[in-house]
Image (tube, grey):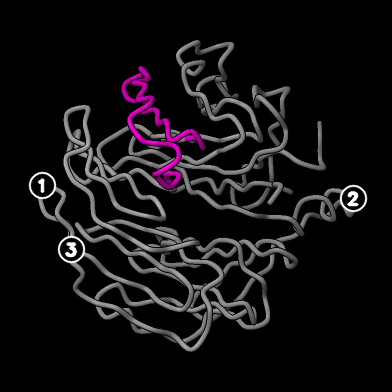
Amino acid sequence: MATDNGIAKFDGKNFKIYTTSQGLPDNEITDIFIDSSHRIWVTPFRRTAAYYNPIKDRFENEDTDPELQKVELGNTNRGSVLQYGGIAFCNNLRDFFIYKNGKVTVYKGLMNVKKSGTPEKIIEFRPERYLVISPDSVRVFIKNRFTKSFPLQNDFFYSEYFGNTLYIASANKIKKYRVDNEGNINQILEKTFPFVIRIFCKAGKELAVATYNRTTYPVDTATLELKDPLLYNIAVRNVLEDKNGSTWISSIDRGLIKIQQKRISSFTITDKALNDEITQHFTTLAVINKKYLWVIIMARF
């Protein structure tokens, strides 16, 4: 059993490690997603995506599910959970792939490689209607073609979407856009902060930002105002809120942290070798069926 990398499942008491022996295409996992059907997806480094089969307690890969061979990630690993089922992937050639109901639909050559930014996220804002988010624009994709686009000017950014609302964070700002049924987006709010945003992500029904000085704040989705800090002096990679309202934080150097009603817990493993390998290198979090916490160990960034 590999302990220097892979993916782990935490049931509240114990960790179980999954590696290539349990179907991972590679032990170096760069991201983890859960689609709307609660299926766990992972993207290995420079390999095809895989998903978890709870009946077999292992991962299905391109060898066991040939449909995954159609997903050409190349040197990229961007995956987007779709609101109405399935998951989408895109690569640095501006191709994107949508996996739904066990089938992959391939969209290649629709975006100009020289004139278009690489898609960072694909959002299904209505059934079979998508927003393709790139640094240069938001493109609306309906019935196998782009119908309109809205310019953006971001070199580096994060985006999140829920409640018919698109949030884009770049530098020291968060912008909030309302999305209608046709994919039109209208900016309704902008907030400037006295710091550069290092991490921006969902955290339950709110958003969360982490700064370069190692402070993490919840962000009110309605007003974009900062709430009281969750943590100080901890380098955060991801923030997640579970069904009980507890906040789980994966850190770069402090392992896995749980905050429950202002009480902070740090999770370790009694075996020192395992603890040194695992708990100090959590990168991404995901919750499945409100029961298990999944984490990535020592992903490359």
Compared with 152, 219 (above or below) is below
Residues tagged 1 and 3 counted as in contact (Cβ below 8 A): no
Residue situated in front as seen by the camera: 195 or 295: 195
**Label 2 element class:** helix
Give the residue type at disc 1.
Glu
- Percent coordinates x, y for residue 301 in the rendering: 68, 51
Check disc 1 and report the residue beneath it: 182
Give the residue type at disc 2.
Ala
Observer-side mark, 2 or 3, equals 3
Q: Real-space Cα distance between discs 1 and 3?
A: 11 Å
Residue 113 magenta-drawn?
A: yes
Check disc 2 and report the residue beneath it: 273
Sooner in the amino-acid sequence: mark 2 or mark 3: 3
| Residue 178 badge | 3
Q: Residues within 10 Å of mark 3 (few under 14, many from 20)?
A: some
Give the residue type at disc 3.
Arg
* Residue at x 68% of width, y 55% of height: 282
The quarter of the image holding the N terminus is: top right
Question: The magenta stretch spans which residues?
Answer: 91-119
> Is residue 241 shown to the viewer in this render?
no
* Residue at x 65% of width, y 31% of height: 46
* Residue at x 32% of width, y 53% of height: 137
Q: Real-space Cα distance between discs 2 and 3?
A: 49 Å
Q: Is residue 288 left or right of residue 298?
A: left
Splitting the image into 4 quarters, where does residue 270 fall?
Answer: bottom right
Q: Is residue 208 left or right of residue 181?
A: right
